[in-house]
Image: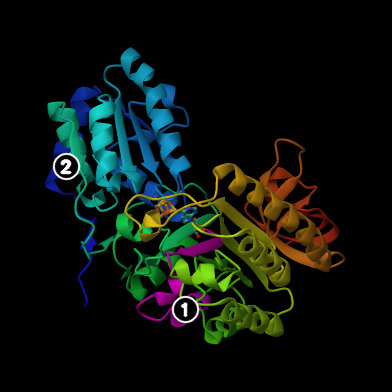
Amino acid sequence: MVVKPISSGIESFELSLLKNVISEKYKGRSPVCYLHSYGCQQNVSDGEKIKGELERAGFVFCEDEESADLIVLNTCAVRENAHERVYGKLGELKHLKERNKELVICVCGCMVQQEYVAEKIKETYPHVSLVFGTFALPSLHKMLYEVLAFRKRVFNISENDDPRIYEDVPMVRGSKFKAYVTVMYGCNNFCTYCIVPYVRGRERSREPEAVISEVRQLVREGYKEITLLGQNVNSYAYGFEKLLRALNDIEGDFWIRFMSSHPKDVSFELIDTIVDCEKVCTHLHLPVQSGNDEILKRMNRRYDTKKYLEIVDYARSRADGFSFSTDIIVGFPGESYEQFCDTKAFVRKVGYDNIYSFVYSKREGTRASKLEDNISSKQKGLWLRELLDEQRETVEKLFHRFVGRTLRVLVEEKSKKDGFLTGHSYENIIVEFEGDESLTGSFCNVKILDAMNWALKGKLIDQI
Ligand code: 5AD
Ligand code: SF4
């Protein structure tokens, strides 16, 4: 089904109403917004769009809650601790609201797309005036107008089945040289532990022309790294490999990364495309979740460890430095210690340059939430520690493959702690070296001298 995108381009009636009420309420000064996004890159990118729409209405942004007229918490639902952090923050904000009655507090994003959460906020946190889910961005101006003009509490948790894509949204990006570009929204996979399909709806792909013109514009503005986002970019409706090739053809010196990939949908053609396209970095974030086939089946992942290893082997046969990172869930309901040990062994076998590991968190409404969970959280915590220790040892050895080589690095910042410049290499490994802060945002060649268990240390050769 082809659905015409909704455009944010033209100034709507709601936006002009909002601008009027803002100019009256704040007496001509620009209102100040503090926005914090929890969770994944997709959510950070949504936060940049929310800021874009707020900027159109006249808001400016600050880094501290105390000086804000509007506080926006853009939430994540993927694990319980993400929920707890938001409830904790809302508790703190109560005092701020008591001191400043005009403060507007807003909660949006994945967590509040779940009805029981929106209900809880309505009941327990009366100082929150605006709550909206992941589908409500197109009505942000209207919602905010109602809050400001009529002092109403607005709750907008629309059904998550709107297939339209909201295009031409202005964005206030968090970086001048690294940008996120969404290629698809939603998820169709229904892994049994995961809440995402329930809070972000079904898969919707942006048209390739829209993605290409956004990237072209970013490159023109000087962006050096473009990360394409989607819950599973490999099921991009218009052909992900084709999109990568088209983006690679855009003139300019920049890198292309993407995440996340689903092992069931990764083809050798994708690997060939990464290797052929020099702007596409030779790194794949490929969440494995477990190294045990029985657990993978119960997670509804629809691949096995054999298929996963075929991808890894093929990638490494095409490019030696090819780097893999992954996500792992420890303590899925019913998982035995032996099954967990399979995961540890699998991690060693693949040789990941980075892993993100999480203790399983039961999510209301998912299929796994109905499974009996017989492992104590203390036990799961110990397994997680075991896995991390294993990874730390593995990675230090792995990183030695880079010692003596010169890597291309995008410099990201000067560390406040030790004064080193830090950035990521083409292979997505953190590299530290001495140099001037003015190199931030540019590519440098760095000769690698040493490997630590979380990063490489090197010496600046030249800026390129
Ligand atoms: N519990 C723990 N981790 C989870 N993830 C997703 N759902 C859960 C859950 N219920 C992890 C997966 C996913 C990453 C973004 O978060 O590893 O890849
Ligand atoms: Fe991202 Fe998933 Fe968290 Fe939503 S629930 S912010 S999609 S990690």
Q: Which mark is residue 142?
A: 2
Residue 101 is drawn in which quadrant?
A: top left
Mark 2 or mark 1, whichever is nearer to me: 1
The x and y percentages for residue 164 are: 22, 64
Q: Does 12 appear above or below 59?
A: below
Q: Nearer the viewer, residue 149 or 298?
A: 298
Q: Is residue 462 visible?
A: no
Q: Nearer the viewer, residue 21 or 370?
A: 370
Was residue 85 drawn as part of the magenta stretch in this picture? Answer: no
Q: Which residue is mark 1?
A: 265
Element at label 1: loop
Distance Cα–Cα, label 2 vs label 1: 40 Å
Check the picture and name the quadrant holding the N terminus.
bottom left
Q: Is residue 422 visible?
A: yes
Q: Residue at x 47, y 54 (%)?
A: 41
CA neighbours of label 1 inside 10 A, class few (<14), some (14 to 19), many (20+): some
Element at label 2: helix
Q: Residue at x 26, y 63 (%)?
A: 165
Q: Is mark 1 within 8 Å of ligand 1?
A: no
331 displayed left or right of 229: right
Stretch in magenta: 220-249
Residue 288 is drawn in which quadrant?
A: bottom right
